[in-house]
Amino acid sequence: MHLAVVGLSHHTAPVEIRERLSIPEHSLQSSLITLRADDQVLEASILSTCNRLEIYSLLRQPQEGVAAIQNFLSLHSGLPGQELNPHLFALHHEEAIQHLLRVSAGLDSLVLGEGQILSQVKKMYRLGQDHQSIGPILNRLLNQAVSTGKRVRSETKLGSGAVSISSAAVELAQLKVGQGQGLDELVSLCDEQIAVVGAGRMGRLLIQHLQAKGARRLVLINRTVAKAEALSADFPDLPIRCLGLDQLDAQLQDCSLLFTSTGADEPLINCQRLNGLRRRQRLMLVDIGVPRNISSDAGQASNVQCFDVDDLQEVVERNQAARRELALQAEVLLEEDQRAFLEWWDGLEAVPTINRLRRQLEDIREQELLKALSRMGPDFSERERKVVEALSKGIINKVLHGPTTALRAPQPRVQRLQTMESLERLFELNSQGEASDGSKDGGKIS
């Protein structure tokens, strides 16, 4: 068995590649089924966000398994391997574990220490369980990742006041508006006519940050107006007008600043649409959706500035320097949690030996129990039979406790192998056959 992660992120791929790999939640189950259908993939989970698409997996063979996942990503994106693979990374075992823990802690995010990624890792874990694509190994790893993410945020100040993608988008708009006024600083947005397209989680965060940065009036556009109205009710101090998508053109004509963050698979705004409008003023478009909600050609329209998630780096770098020291503190915690998982993983090497020993002792128990019961005769009640059987099981569990604890305890691998060899020789376990390895065949690892 081999742990690996294959994917891409804002570190390795531009947004036009990332959006081709994005997997919406309604497609996750079918994607996981496709992955698990390959004999090389024993367990799989998918993390799909605006800045990354990563597939965590337990593989039979590292090279063949990674190739199977790369082939899946190529088919899913429609990109040939020679075009896609340069953007992909593949990390194995210890590096894969370390990467997941860093992701969950917010240390690999565009915005260092962001909180939303932990929620996304939790969601990956839950969906993997719901769709039965993860087994005992990834279940343990993802649970560790969630615990690590929580621990970093509770034991360091990395998560306190951390900017998010949404707040970075608002700061970018402030910076660009200021530059339009000849200033190289963040300015108030009180004079801007602002629209937000999308009433989901990111839309909520956008409104929160816009309100904090001085926005006085705002239009919220959503496919379902009722959902927009429900969101606007949470901001009683900010006048928000709620409209449907059919009013998007009118707002593109009237607004000076428009943010988009929807789950649309195709761009809502492009150059042709903008050029067909009678706009009264300059227009700044900020798109934090992946796939993008605004076409790459929108910035070619007259008097239009267009930005996407990859343009946030300018703002992010202004906020990162003070957080790097906190990140170093978090790395220490990550090393501890990674070591704990690896110790558990190393202990799995002893599982086949433990299973063979248990099976042998269980066979002996059942044989001796049958002999004893046959000598008791018909006067032996059902209740007495159950008591004797429970007694025999209890003895087996007591006998197994010492060897099991010794084999699974953190120790040098050579020492564990010597202990396993001694047990196998003393109890003649090699003739018992292989026990379950926790793979697709239905084995259990406790």
Image (cartoon, rainbow, N blue to C red):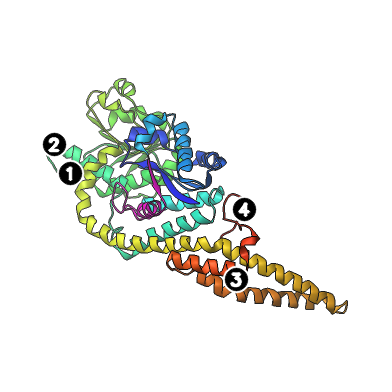
Residue that badge 1 annotates: 187
Give the foreground label among 3 and 2.
3
Q: Is residue 82 left or right of residue 418?
A: left
Which residue position holds label 3? 426
Q: Residue at x 66, y 70 (%)?
A: 361
Q: Are marks 1 and 2 in contact (CB under 8 Å)?
A: yes
Measure the C-alpha gap from mark 3 to mark 2.
83 Å
Q: Earlier in the sequence, mark 1 or mark 4?
A: 1
State the residue position of label 4.
Answer: 442
x and y percentages locating residue 185 in the rendered image: 15, 44
First in sequence: mark 3 or mark 1? 1
Q: Amino acid at mark 3?
A: Leu
Q: CA distance from mark 1 to mark 2?
A: 9 Å
- The kind of residue on which mark 1 rests is Val
The secondary element bearing badge 4 is classed as: loop
Q: Residue 374: where, in percent of width, then height? A: 84, 74
Quarter holding the C terminus? bottom right
Label 2 residue SS? loop
Regarding mark 1 in the picture, which secondary structure is present there?
A: loop
Q: Amino acid at mark 2?
A: Gln
Residue 431 shows in this picture: yes
**Which residue is disc 2 drawn over?**
181
Left or right: 188 in relation to 134: left
Q: Residues within 10 Å of mark 1 (few under 14, many from 20)?
A: some
Separation of marks 3 and 1 at Cα, in angstroms = 77 Å
SS at badge 3 = helix
